[in-house]
Every structure is written in C-alpha cells, then in structure tokens.
Image: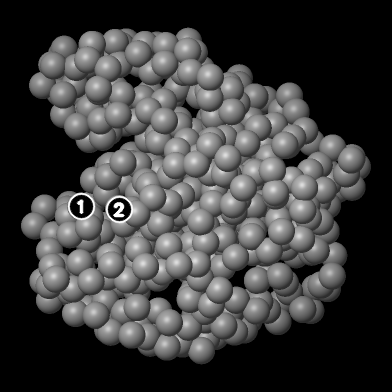
Amino acid sequence: MDKSWLTASAAAQGRAIAEGTLDPVALTEAYLDKIASRAESPRIYARTTPDRALSEAMAAHDRARSQTRHGPLDGVPISWKDLFDTAGVATESGTALLKGRTPDRDAEVLANATAAGLVCLGKTHLSELAFSGLGLNPITATPPNINDPGAVPGGSSSGAAASVAFGLAAAGIGSDTGGSVRIPSAWNDLVGLKTTSGLLSLEGAVPLASAFDTVGPLTRTVEDAALLLGALGGTKAPDLRGATLTGTRLAVLRTGAFEDIRPEPEQAFAAAVARLAEAGAQITELHAPEVDEALALSGVLFATEAYGIWKDVIEAAPEKMFPPILDRFRGGRDYDAPAYVAGWRKLVELRAVWADRTRAFDGVLLPTAPTLPPNVDRLLSEKAYFVEENLLALRNTRIGNLMGVCALNLPTGTPSCGLSIMGQPFGEAALLRLGAAAEAALT
C-alpha cells in the first residue's frame, strides 16, 4: 500500500475504499505499524486497540467487496480521546485518579461511529481530566506539537490533534468544554469542530463540566468534519456541495478577542480575513459588550461545576494530580450555590443579547488563539506562566462555549495560527457549508 494514504483525508480514504483501490485492512495495518515504529507514539496514544481495529477493518473489507458499506467513512481508521469509554479497554481521562478504570461498554458516539463502519485505532492522551487548553500533562504524557518540538500541542484534545498531524490516524475525536478541540486544531494546523452542547451524546464520556462539554472531530478538511459529524450522531452528514462565500455576511468580533494578542496570530487572522473578503464575503466589525460580561462569569460557571463533579475523587488523593490542574479544580470551592445559579441566569440573558446581535450574520470571526504554543519547560518551571498562558489560550475559544454556539477552526496557512468561525446554536450544517467555502479561499 502507498504510505501516502496515511496522510490523506478521511473522505479520500473512504472514496478509495468504495472504489476498491484501497483495502481497509492494509490501511489499518499501516497505521498500526507506523504507530508502533514512531518515537512520538507513546506520547500520543495512551493505548492502541489493534485487535478491535483489525476486526473492524476486516468487516469493512467484506462490506466493501459486497457493496454493503455502512457509510462514506466505512473502513477509515481514527483515534479517540481517552475520555470516551471503550468496552473492556481502560479509559482514564489523563489522570492517575482513574488509573485502571475499565468500562464495560462503548460511549454512545463511539458506538454510532462503529455502526457507521469507522475503525477504532486506540485512545489518545489529553490534559488531566480535560481541564487545560495547553495539553501539558506530566502525569501521563504531553503529546508533541507538529510545528515546534519544544512547545505544547494545545489541549485538552492534545493527543487527538497529534495523532492526525503526525499521520497516525485519519481523524481524531475529541471533546470541547472551553476550546479543547479548537486550540489543538489551531496549533497543529487542522480543522476542528466544536458542536453545540446537546447535539451529540455525552453518554459514556468522562465529564469535566457537563453543562459545557461537547464532542467534536479534529480533521484534515471541513469535508471530513462534516462526515464525522454525521457518523458520531448516527445521522446524515451535512451537504457541502455548492458552498460559496459570495454574498455571505461575516462579522469580526472585536470585543474580548484581541486583547494581549501576539503579532503572529493577529497578522495571520488579518490576512485570512482579507482572503475571505476577496472571495466575496462582506466583512463587518462587531462590538458586543455582552462578551466581556460572559467571560467574567467563567470562574463561577466552569470551575464550580467541575469541582462539584470531581470533589470527592480529587480530595481522596490530591497528591496524584498535577498541581496547576488541582488548583484549577479547587478554584470551584470559591463559589457557593447562589453564585452559581445567579451566574447561569445571567449567562442565559447574555446569550439572548448575543443571539439578537449576531442574527444577521452568517458567521462571527475571531483568532482561535491569541497566542502561539508556549514552551513545555517554561510551563513546568514557572507556575505563574502556566496560569497566564492557559487562560490566554482559552480566552477566545471560551466565548463560543459561553454563548452556546457551534464553532469551527480553520488553518490560516501560518503555522499554529487558526481562524475561528462561530455559528448559531445547532447551526452546524450552515457553519460547515460556510467553513467549506472559507477553506477553499484560505488554501
């Protein structure tokens, strides 16, 4: 088999399998062989599932021969963030607190993907309990960054991104609570889709903050993201044919998104927006004071729920945790129930204001991350630097979670600099069509 297939898009692999020019068994074996041979692999995969993968690939091979394929990605091998339950295989969510935790059935999204014919290669590393946008995890492993060997990959879906960027999976499935799909996608030059909360099932996914947790793919192309969205939900994928930027109305979010931005992502964003305008998009600047108000609620909403979920487990053995992540969880102790309830009531009001303000636009644009991937050694040695960089990395992506919308990261062509497009709640089909047109303009 031509090894270039290992870095092809998932959609291209699926088409080749359908045409009979690519064997899913040979493809799966090639991925498993590459994973076994690459020095970076133990930092990317927490564990592989070769027996399952080969069994699923053989079944896909038989379906392809009999022309009974289950979908356009039947036989395509992908990775799964190690917070999605896999029957009989440890799912530890990047923490020693859950070492040896082995569920007896698959997460619902994994079951849906398996029913669509996708092949499970294994489980990828992540930030501890998914509570960091950096991807630094000295407890289990810190995956590599495709653009800078000394930098973090972004998190919390760090291994998911690395598995695709390093050619060790056709796509990766991650989760996004405050930016955990989009940041590693941006910092590793991938497409990343944050879905609307409630669109895809969280059953069998280890939670961080359930009110904000979402499931999403990290991929090479927007087409791949659309096809995987359909597979994860057990539904038909959005139709991207004929997507165009001509006549679309896009807003550049100025409030809250550009403070302390570094030169590289700012310049990459400006150049990307100019290309979208050249392709026919109408660009308007947007000022939305409700964004700053919502960002100010982050502590009471995210940390309080996270600590409420994990308090008993954490406080039974806090010494097992990476101290900066332990501190983030314990930040949830600072708020009482009335503050949490008041915070949510206020956020609901702000979401309504945001919805009215953005209704006339097809999408809202902002830099995915206002900073480049920071250095691993400095993050480990300087506590204040870890806190500062983590908060800055998550600042822009968190807006989408707070406003309850779907969002898409696209590579800009500048390494580790992504462009985000935010859509409307449950507007994934429209967002992906817009993303496909934007992708064509940017590449």
Q: Nearer the viewer, residue 15 or 375?
A: 375
* Residue at image location 27% in from the left, 17% down from the top: 3
Q: Which residue is mark 1?
A: 443
Q: Which residue is mark 2?
A: 413
* Number of callouts: 2
Q: Quadrant of the N terminus?
A: top left
Asked if marks 1 and 2 touch (Cβ < 8 Å), the reply is yes
* Residue at image location 62% in from the left, 36% down from the top: 142
Determine whether 168 is above or below 318 in the image: above
- In terms of secondary structure, where does tag 2 sit? loop
Q: Residue 135: x and y, percent?
A: 60, 45
- Identify which amino acid the numbered label 2 is placed on: Gly
Q: Residue 94: x and y, percent?
A: 67, 36
* Residue at image location 52% in from the left, 86% down from the top: 290
Quarter where residue 166 is shown: top left
Any part of residue 242 in sight: yes
- In terms of secondary structure, where does tag 1 sit? loop
Q: Would residue 279 appear left or right of 33 to someone viewing this image?
A: left
- Identify which amino acid the numbered label 1 is placed on: Thr
Mark 2: few/some/many CA within 10 Å (<14, 14-19, 20+): some
